[in-house]
Amino acid sequence: MFGPGTRFHRLFDDPCWAVAMIRATVLEAAHPQIGAALVDSSTFLTHPWRRMTNTLRSLQRVTGADEAARDREVARLNRMHARMSGTDAANRPYDAMDPAARAWVVATMFESAVTMFRWSGRPLDQAAMEELYAQFLAFQALLGDSSGQLPASLRDFWPYYDRVVEEELENTEALRTILYHLFDHLPAPPLLEGVPTLWAAGRALAGPAIGVVTVASLPETFRRRAGLTEVPGAQALSQAAYLALGSARLLPEGWVTADNLLDLISLSPDSDDPRARALAAVGDGMKRFGALLRLVTPLPDEPERPGAGRPSGRSTRAGAGRRGAEEFFDTVLDQTGNGYLDWPDLAAMARELSGRLDLDEPEETRLYDAYAAWWRELQSTLDTDGDGRVSRQEYAEAVPSLAGPALIRVAEVLFDVTDADGNQSIDADEYRALFRTGFHRELLDSNGTYTRAAFIKDFLAFMAGRQRSTAYDPLLAQA
């Protein structure tokens, strides 16, 4: 059912899958339980590129040929989702492990894949559709969900899908955010960070078009009930978008793959990867083009993003200087972008670090527990009005209290789990696992390693908001 060569695996390398996944995510966000979990715990608004990169890497592991890696990733996903529960704005409980909600995620992926093939001029015949549905059922079973949440046959799937669309989906806050706010404020990926003018021009055109294409592709009954207006000509635009993306499959094999996309999104210019030099050269050319575009066609200033204050461009550790308290709050602490520091923000940090390091139990729990202890310390120290969260103002008024004993414990645990061989120093491979870059010269000691003392010092300096860092800014601050 899985591994290279299967229809299921090839799906994620299809250029049209990027648009299909946006559509599937909107349909997921319209489910009340999933939408509430996205609003409370997800970083999709503040860190969209990081979220997309992590999702694609996770899908690659789950659908790959390595059975051990697949089982390990599934266990990690289930542990992550088990930590997401609460109540929504209407005081309804939600649980990311709810079987019906998880089944709907798989259903939206399958139905969006079928729609993708149809709109891109490659409709699946009945046999191919049956094969793909069987693979999605196997994917659901792999996640550990009991059978019965999704119909066993494709024939019974469509009535199930129509019923959920007509009876359960809502115009949720998460849906509205994805459709109407996410692309308006989408930050540039690393390759385009130095050319804000060029990025703003492209986003001004692409953002509304993506929203129009996505709305037009949603089920008509849901569009009417949710009050989502379809722009005249949107169906034709959607068809054209899928056809245009689908034409990329005519390029030589291997040119358009999920791995290449991940590299373009996440490769840092200061990485030791040889491809970074090529990206840096492309970036320099784009900067010159962006400057010319600014002279020829002045554009308005960048709109302020939710939780604004995120800096553009990269800072080196040597010349970074201090960052303001509010800027640090927005770029690092407020991971979910709701304007407050609360437990989901620190849980998002622990989740990102655990994923980077591919932690298993009990190391993952140790890291989460350390962050939980830090949150309790922050809450007792900074939450002056007792509302269970820390506002930007409360944080700014008590910045020195951030680096207490619990944060030191977080640093110690993070060093321990990064130091995979337990030799009390971090070598180049361990460093790269966490930061996805090579050693920076100033981080090395005389033995060519990163010591515990240096690691903890740098982590505390960054998390206390005193300075930017070439290592930690891409890890926790950049989108």
Image (cartoon, grey):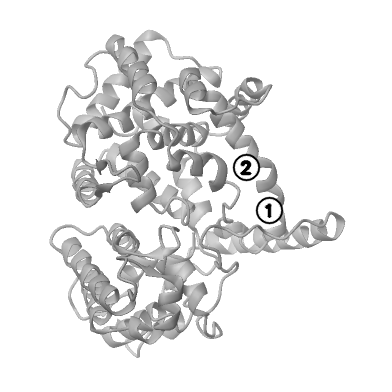
> Is disc 2 placed on a helix, strand or loop?
helix
Q: Residue at (35%, 90%) from the top-left corner?
A: 446
How many discs mark residues in the rendered view? 2
Q: Is 291 placed above or below 170 here? A: below
Q: Which residue is mark 2?
A: 207
Question: Viewed as shown, does residue 378 lie left or right of 29?
Answer: left
Is disc 2 in contact with disc 1, using a CB cutoff of under 8 Å? no
Query: What x and y, as percent, mark residue 422?
Result: 17, 75
Point out residue 368 in the picture as x, y percentages from the top left corner: 22, 64
Residue 5 visible, this angle: no
Q: Position of residue 33 (x, y in %)?
A: 30, 38
Can you say whether 289 is above or below 310 in the image?
A: above
Neighbour tally class for label 2: few under 14, some 14-19, many 20 plus, Cα within 10 Å: some
Q: Residues within 10 Å of mark 1 (few under 14, many from 20)?
A: many
Mark closer to the chain start, 2 or 1: 1
Q: CA distance from mark 2 to mark 1?
A: 10 Å
As drawn, the residue found furthest toward the right would be 296
Disc number for residue 303 = none
**Quick one: 218 or 318, which is closer to the camera?**
218
Q: Is residue 408 in sight in this rendering?
A: yes
Q: Which mark is residue 200?
A: 1
Q: Which kind of residue does numbered mark 2 sit on?
A: Gly
The residue nearer to you, when weighing 299 against 254, is 299
Image point (50%, 46%), residue name? 261
Q: Quadrant of the N terminus?
A: top left
Q: Amino acid at mark 1?
A: Ala
Residue 341 in percent (x, y) is at 37, 66
Residue, x 37% and y 46% (percent of image)? 38
* Quarter holding residue 209: top right
The part of the image, by quadrant, that contains residue 364 is bottom left
